């Protein structure tokens, strides 16, 4: 079963790759067959097998010999690994499908942000709508089994998470923007390396979506853990002298994965640390 899910994950990852490539350019997801981004030669079926083709072709297009981005096998691999990890956690069921959908969105949104420096906000809204839909379905199942109380009702949990995610991010954006405007006015500058905002509206919507899928605790933890990941990368970037201007959203995504799988451990260790 795990191997089957790994293969399915690779195929879904391959679809996510074409979303990442096509959505920002407004190309249909179905119609033209996959082709080489450099020479536009359509791929033959054996050049379009997830992961394997990249290895067999040694990362180059068989027609024009241009390098194929490492992003393709990378996205396929992380999708496959996430599918297997979700199966370990939930088995096959509503929770599996809801979180698989959530993580697919995280992958697409993050890589679009990395490649184009723009967050597709409509995908965040799609996530919110579908996430609420899943929580309604879960609520209906619970009601029919007569095992629910007001404190763990999925729809209410999702809505509370959404409000807290939105609220927290928006408050931060509000005060952060004031602070940056003040800083720019004092230093008489136009922007900080091209940035004028603390958080973009896309980041705010994204945190609303995280709240829908992961509840209040999840949204709060993602909000506070993401800066540490960004800081960690910034240190690496300084050490290896790479550009440190990379968008913030991938950190929010990475933090979501960390909190999703290890959130309870983090909370437990944190309280142990506090109490001593
Ligand atoms: Zn080519």
Image (cartoon, rainbow, N blue to C red):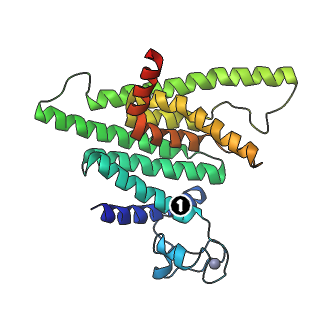
Dividing the image into 4 quarters, which one contains the N terminus? bottom left
Tell me which residue sits at (24%, 40%) in the image. 137
The foreground one among 255 and 111 is 255
Dividing the image into 4 quarters, which one contains the C terminus? top left
**46, above or below 235, in the image:** below
Q: Is residue 139 visible?
A: yes
Tell me which residue sits at (35%, 31%) in the image. 158
Ligand 1 sits in which quadrant?
bottom right
Question: Along the horizontal axis of the image, is 193 left or right of 133?
Answer: right
**Image location of residue 228, percent across then percent down:** 59, 33
**Image location of residue 270, percent across then percent down:** 46, 24
Q: Image quarter for residue 224? A: top right
**Image location of residue 8, percent across then percent down:** 36, 64
Give the residue at the far front of this rendering: 276
**71, above or below 126, in the image:** below
Q: Image quarter for residue 129? A: top left
Tell me which residue sits at (66%, 78%) in the image. 39
The foreground one among 27 and 139 is 139
Q: Say which residue label 1 marks.
A: 74
| Structural crowding at the residue carrying mark 1, measured as other residues with C-alpha within 10 Å and reported as few (<14), some (14–19) or many (≥20) | some
Tell me which residue sits at (52%, 65%) in the image. 73
Q: Image quarter for residue 169? A: top right
**Image location of residue 124, percent across then percent down:** 48, 42
The foreground one among 236 and 79 is 236
**226, above or below 113, in the image:** above
Count the labels in the image.
1
Q: Is residue 201 visible?
A: no
């Amino acid at each position: 079963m795990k191997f089957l899910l790994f293969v399915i994950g690779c195929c879904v990852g391959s679809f996510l790759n074409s979303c990442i490539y096509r959505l920002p350019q407004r190309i249909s997801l179905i119609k033209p067959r996959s082709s080489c981004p450099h020479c536009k030669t359509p791929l033959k079926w054996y050049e379009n097998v997830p992961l394997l083709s990249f290895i067999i072709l040694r990362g180059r297009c068989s027609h024009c010999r241009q390098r194929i981005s490492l992003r393709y096998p990378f996205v396929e691999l992380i999708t496959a690994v996430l599918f297997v990890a979700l199966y370990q956690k939930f088995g096959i069921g509503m929770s599996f499908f809801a979180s698989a959908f959530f993580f697919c969105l995280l992958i697409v949104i993050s890589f679009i942000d990395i490649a184009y420096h723009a967050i597709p906000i409509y995908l965040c809204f799609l996530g919110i709508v579908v996430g609420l839909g899943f929580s309604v379905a879960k609520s209906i199942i619970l009601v029919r089994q007569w095992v629910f109380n007001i404190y763990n009702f999925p729809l209410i949990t999702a809505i509370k998470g959404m409000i807290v995610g939105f609220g927290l991010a928006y408050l931060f954006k509000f005060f952060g923007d004031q602070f940056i405007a003040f800083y720019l006015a004092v230093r008489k500058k136009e922007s900080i390396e091209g940035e004028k905002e603390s958080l973009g509206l896309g980041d705010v919507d994204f945190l609303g979506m995280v709240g829908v899928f992961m509840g209040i605790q999840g949204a709060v933890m993602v909000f506070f853990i993401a800066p540490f990941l960004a800081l960690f990368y910034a240190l690496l970037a300084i050490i290896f002298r790479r550009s440190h201007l990379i968008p913030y959203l991938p950190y929010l995504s990475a933090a979501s994965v960390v909190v999703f799988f290890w959130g309870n451990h983090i909370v437990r260790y944190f309280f142990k640390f506090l109490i001593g």
